[in-house]
Amino acid sequence: MTIDWSWIGEHQSDLLSLTASHLQAALSAVLFGLLISLPLAVVAHRIRALRGFLLGLSNVLFTIPSIAVFVLLLPVSGLTRTTTVIGLTIYTLVVLLRNTVEGLDSVPAKTKEAAKAMGTRPMRTLLTVELPLAVPVIMAGVRIATVMAISLVSVATYIGDGGLGQLFTDGFQRNFPTPVIVGVVLTLLLALVADAVLVAVQRLLTPWARTRTRTRPRTRKA
């Protein structure tokens, strides 16, 4: 299987446009997924009776085939980018919601009790103590959700969107492998770059983790 390098040179602007469109759809879905999952996770964490229901609902939504989700959304939002983003957002919820709940659960009880003893209100404790300490677990979910969303954008090609997924259909229809290979490579690169950026963001949000790593005592060899 050979690559037509001249085709790549002739379509550089189109490739950049499709890559930007692909990334915009994936990041929008993750952002909306976070906006939805954060309050739901707080509710699931505080009200145990709703925990199983919310997590179970997100799991059920995740089991629906992606193409079926897009088809079901067509009567509501039509052949638009909105349909793509809503569908992808649904799939990010199962990861983001569960990881956020687990992140909040991982905050030591003694830490919350200390904040309460200092007279800190529950909302302030949540924003200044619980969520910051839960960041590593939440960010792990964000990384998974982002990579997953980037991979799923291509499915939206069936409704006229799909970013780099359009290269797949173009290549298959014309029996021309170059667009398919380029689409796969660019999708992988997007996922790798996005994951690396999120790792850097996590390090910025958790400076205490870097400090703890630097000050960890070294073990001496016998």
Image: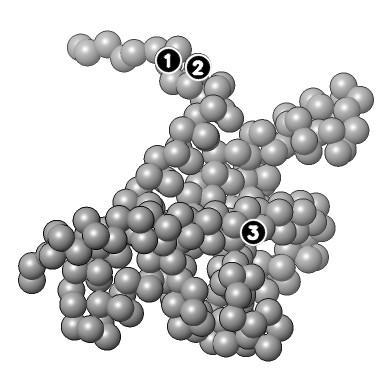
Circles 3 and 2: CB distance less than 8 Å? no
The answer to whether the residue labelled 2 contacts the one labelled 1, judged by CB atoms less than 8 Å apart, is yes
Quarter placement of the N terminus: bottom left
Report the residue marked by disc 3: 33
N-term mark: 3 or 2:
3
Question: Residue 13: x, y in percent?
Answer: 35, 56
Mark 1 highlights which residue? 214
Instruction: Give the CA separation, mark 3 to mark 2.
Output: 31 Å
Question: In the image, is 138 to the left or to the right of 182?
Answer: right
Labels 1 & 3 near each other (Cβ < 8 A)? no
Q: Residue furthest left?
A: 1
Quick check: can you spot residue 195?
yes
* Callout 1: SS: helix
Residue at left 42%, top 15%?
214
Q: Amino acid at mark 3?
A: Gly
Q: Position of residue 46 (x, y in %)?
A: 80, 52
Viewed as shown, does residue 19 lie left or right of 99? Answer: left
Residue topped by disc 2 = 211
Label 3 crowd (10 A; few <14 / some 14-19 / many >=20): many
* Mark toward the start of the polypeptide (1 vs 3): 3
Gap between marks 1 and 3, in whole Å?
A: 34 Å
Q: Amino acid at mark 1?
A: Arg
Secondary structure under badge 3?
A: helix
**From what the image shows, is residue 206 above or below residue 3?**
above
> Residue sitting at 25 percent across and 69 percent down?
179
The picture places residue 75, in percent across and down from the top left corner, at 68, 88
Residue 32 spot, x, y in % from top left: 66, 58
Query: Is residue 136 depicted above or below 206 in this figure?
Result: below
The alpha-carbon separation of the residues under discs 2 and 1 comes to 5 Å
> In which quadrant is the C terminus drawn?
top left
